[in-house]
Image (cartoon, rainbow, N blue to C red):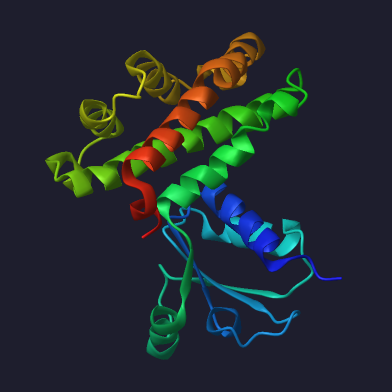
Amino acid sequence: MVVPAEQVYEQIRAMSAEAGASKVVVFGSRAKGTNRPKSDIDLAVAGCPNFSQLEDALQNDLWSLLKLDVVNLDEPISDELRAEIERDGRCSMRKYENYVAALRSLAQAPQQDLDNEFVQSGIIGKCKMQFELGWKLMKALLAYEGDPVSAAGSPRDAIKAAFQYYDFMDESLWLRMLRDRNDSAHVYDAAPARRLVDTIITDYIPEFERLRQGLADRYGSLLLS
């Protein structure tokens, strides 16, 4: 029995989101609809700060035995291949989907062994990535609102501008997340690390969820365009 394709794509989206990829495109036979159940999965990835690490994870940790061919769109590729990807490719991850996929993974934190230092580091790392995805998503949506911050600006600038549009944002929590993003000391000290993990579970994950729902309510299908 073959693992359902959508289940495989969901895992690809989650892993790509955790790696910070901004775009994942399925191309080849699976994009054209001419694939067989065990056909290869052809992927093109863009905006991933550590492509080799993502590629290794996809090849070795994906819950599928299907063959994967992964192309880095940020590196030189043949004009013919790039044209094929642009012509036939089907986007498998957009900024909002990226954010949601990563949040789904982070939301599993309460079920982990929270006294384990490796688990703590993993949760803190995922929270930092969620924050990065969050402010970059806000920045992208500010362009739709016509806000000049969308053209440039720091995480604080983007969050400050977004706060003017989104009444569902908790100002205090985003300021605390911004502070924790810039403070790495807790990663190397057990007591602060555990306190931060508790804060992530009780405060930050619910706030990330509020952003997800608030943006869905405000923009609807625009988030999937």
In this rendering, position of residue 52 left or right of residue 177: right
Say above or below: 59 vs 49: below
Figure quadrant of the C terminus: bottom left
Where residue 171 appears, x then y in whole percent?
A: 32, 17
Residue situated furthest right in the rendering:
1
Q: Identify which residue, 217 or 224, lies in the foreground.
A: 217
Residue sitting at x 75%, y 17%: 115
Q: Identify which residue, 218 or 94, lies in the foreground.
A: 218
Q: Identify which residue, 153 or 24, lies in the foreground.
A: 24
Q: Quadrant of residue 166?
A: top left
In this rendering, position of residue 151 left or right of residue 211: left
Res. 136 in view: no
Q: How many marks?
A: 0
In this rendering, position of residue 191 left or right of residue 47: right
Where residue 121 appears, x then y in whole percent?
A: 64, 28
Where residue 217 appears, x then y in whole percent?
A: 38, 39
Residue situated furthest bottom in the rendering:
80
Residue sitting at x 51%, y 54%: 50
Residue sitting at x 57%, y 33%: 125
In this rendering, position of residue 104 left or right of residue 59: left
Residue sitting at x 53%, y 59%: 51
Where residue 61 appears, x then y in whole percent?
A: 74, 56
Q: In which quarter of the image is residue 158?
A: top left
Res. 98 in view: yes
Say above or below: 94 vs 100: below
Q: Identify which residue, 56 or 103, lies in the foreground.
A: 103
Figure quadrant of the N terminus: bottom right
Say above or below: 75 vs 55: below
